[in-house]
Amino acid sequence: MDRTLRAHRSLSRDQRQTLKEAIFNVGLWRRRLAFLLDQDDAPPPLLLFAFLHGLAHVPAPEAASLAGVGEGISTLNHSPPPSLALRYSLPDWLADHFSRELGPDADAFCAHINVPGPITLRVNPLRSSREELAERLRSEGVSTLPGPWSPLALHIDGPRPNLYALPSLQEGRFEVQDEGSQLLGLLLEALPGETVVDLCAGAGGKTLQLGAAMRDSGRLFAHDPDPERLDRLLQRSSRAGLTRVQVLRSPPSPGLGADRVLVDAPCSELGSLRRGPDQRFRITPDVLAHFPPLQLDILQRGADLVRPGGRLVYATCTVNRAENEDVVSAFLAARPDYRLIRPGAGWLSDACLRDGFLFVAPHSHGTDAFFAAVLERSAG
């Protein structure tokens, strides 16, 4: 898409946006469009016609002209799609999985993963308060609304701005981060002067959040098996005003005696399907069973880093009990020195809890779907 846009620089901003939306939506809705056309292997122009006429309700002659299919096709199958998979353009196995996991909420969940999520910012409290950042962004032409769940969250209100051109971003006043993801960092409740480990740091969004909570003091270790991600973390740390982040190229050794450890484990990522139109079609059913052994191993290693009385947070961005509750149950059965405690006692809304765990989702919280367990190591 980037190459195409660069090759057609004469396109206006509206034309570029229309092109992006057309590609995104045909990719996302391909199963529903095939149902409308009664063709499983329809060529792209027909898929575009089906989207424009069948879902965007453009009159048939205009839709046919825009899609380049001529006037010959105007009849679509307008009967109600007979399954969750066809209704929301999902592989059958994935729709069945969501039905098992979410029961009566599956329909609402699937509807919401077909709508782009909000652009959410996390304020850097080392630079600004949330109110100060909102005012600063307003002066830069960006309107925001406070997030309902995270005290650090601001949602962009209105058209998507070019965030990377804003002086407030260049000054490290905020990062782009889903509100549900922000809750994971908040659950650790890191304090200034502590020793904290982000064991699956990625590019470091939550590492930066933890560093700000610690007021750039104590010891903050970040590890990830991807060295390029760690390099990006170092660059972002400097912008955010953090000087105490220590990047670990190899896993930390057991017995570190950390006060708090975050394990944001690699997972099937079913909770972030609204972030891209094709992810649902690229994954296969074996993804549901692939990660739990790895997740349990990483969680065990994280547990070995925590001092007696310390805290361990296990989190994923998926909707799969095998990767969530079942991993925690297996861990607790093997580690009697840990117990489950209420996430966010004193500040997190009960609406963000399910069976003693954090669970947020797009249809109920407006966030990507996240799971987290807060575990405490016995002091004895």
Image (cartoon, rainbow, N blue to C red):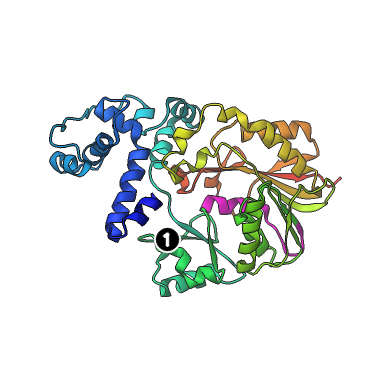
Q: Is residue 178 left or right of residue 117?
A: right
Callout 1 crowding tier (Cα within 10 Å): few <14, some 14–19, many ≥20: many
Residue under the image location 49 percent in, 46 percent down: 368
When the figure is inspected, residue 172 is found, relative to residue 220, above or below; the finding is below
If the image is split into quadrants, where does the C terminus sit? top right
Q: Residue furthest right?
A: 380
Residue under the image location 40 percent in, 48 percent down: 116
When the figure is inspected, residue 116 is found, relative to residue 86, above or below; the finding is below
x then y, percent, for residue 240: 61, 67
Q: Quadrant location of residue 158? A: bottom left
x then y, percent, for residue 328: 68, 35
When the figure is inspected, residue 229 is found, relative to residue 102, above or below; the finding is below
Q: Amino acid at mark 1?
A: Ile
Residue under the image location 76 percent in, 47 percent down: 251
Q: Residue furthest front?
A: 7
Residue 232 visible from this viewpoint: yes
**Does the magenta run of residues contain 183?**
yes
**Does the magenta run of residues contain 59?**
no
Q: Is residue 144 left or right of residue 129?
A: left
Please state the extent of the stretch shown in magenta in the rendering.
179-195
x then y, percent, for residue 288: 57, 29
Task: Write down the residue under mark 1.
Answer: 156
